[in-house]
């Protein structure tokens, strides 16, 4: 064997070993790349599912909150309307036939107030705090209406006390009106509505 043959055999052997090693490295690299790709695809899919679930939950909560806000505004509007009717009736005096009409309005008002309080208790978690704080203003209104009713029940009613209670009732109505409009504005903002719609 001559030197050239030995040299050629060594080179060929080296090239073959290098090609085999390169092939093995290529296959291992591709396997590792594929394993990493599969892992990240799985992770990406999990993240997409989490994002979709979060979006679904937020959408459902927004729908619940929107409905609750609308119902809350509706309750307050009805209470304001009923209280305004009672205040108008109280200003002219509630003797005789008007007494029964006032008592019927008061009964309806108290039922509406109870429904409102129950609604606030049931929806306290999803309603913004400003809406649940409306119970204070409506509570003051209820107290003033009841005070007027109690005074009117007495046969000898002091006119000055009656006028003070009516003034207090009007003040409560004014406060409830202010609260109502503040809540209405907040509701429209929360629901993404502007005043022009």
Image (tube, grey):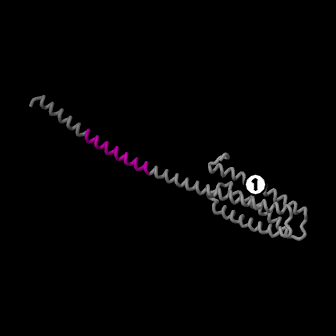
Residue 11 as seen in the image, left or right of residue 166: left
Residue placed farthest to the front in the image? 97
- Between 59 and 38, the one lying in front of the other is 59
Instruction: Locate residue 8, reporting x and y percent.
Output: 15, 31
Q: Nearer the viewer, residue 136 or 178?
A: 178
- Image coordinates for residue 172, horizontal then vertical, percent: 79, 57
Residue positioned 74% across, 59% down in the render: 136
The verdict on residue 67 being magenta is: no
Q: Residues within 10 Å of mark 1 (few under 14, many from 20)?
A: some
Quadrant position of residue 135: bottom right
Per the image, the residue denoted by label 1 is: 177
| Rendered view: 63 above or below 18 | below
Residue 82 vs 25, above or below: the answer is below
Q: Which residues are magenta?
A: 22-45
Q: Is residue 2 left or right of residue 169?
A: left
Dot 1 falls on a residue whose secondary structure is helix
Magenta span main SS: helix
Q: Quadrant of residue 9?
A: top left
All told, the count of numbered labels is: 1
Q: Say which residue appears at 72% left-offset and 67% top-offset.
A: 111
Residue name at image x 80 percent, y 66 percent:
146
Residue 15 rendering spot, x and y as whole percentages: 21, 35
Q: Would residue 39 be counted in the magenta stretch?
A: yes
Measuring from the top left, give residue 140's x and y in whole percent: 77, 60
> Residue at point 28% right, 43% down?
27
In-image side of 71 versus 9 (left or right): right
The quadrant of the picture occupied by the N terminus is: top left
Q: Residue furthest left?
A: 1
26 up-or-down from 50: above or below: above
């Amino acid at each position: 064997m001559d030197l050239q043959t030995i040299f050629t055999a060594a080179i060929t052997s080296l090239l073959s070993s290098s090609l085999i090693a390169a092939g093995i490295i290529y296959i291992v690299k591709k396997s590792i790349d594929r394993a990493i790709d599969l892992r990240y695809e799985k992770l990406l899919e999990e993240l997409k599912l989490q994002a979709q679930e979060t979006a679904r939950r937020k959408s459902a909560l927004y729908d619940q909150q929107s409905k609750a806000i609308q119902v809350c505004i509706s309750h307050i509007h009805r209470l304001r309307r009923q209280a305004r009717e009672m205040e108008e009736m109280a200003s002219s005096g509630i003797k005789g036939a008007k007494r029964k009409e006032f008592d019927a309005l008061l009964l309806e008002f108290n039922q509406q107030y109870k429904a409102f309080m129950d609604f606030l208790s049931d929806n306290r978690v999803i309603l913004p705090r400003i809406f649940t704080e409306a119970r204070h203003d409506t509570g003051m209104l209820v107290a003033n209406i009841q005070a007027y009713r109690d005074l009117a029940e007495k046969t000898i009613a002091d006119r000055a006390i009656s006028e003070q209670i009516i003034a207090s009732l009007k003040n409560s109505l004014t406060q409830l009106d202010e609260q109502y409009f503040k809540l209405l504005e907040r509701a429209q903002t929360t629901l993404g509505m502007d005043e022009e719609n």
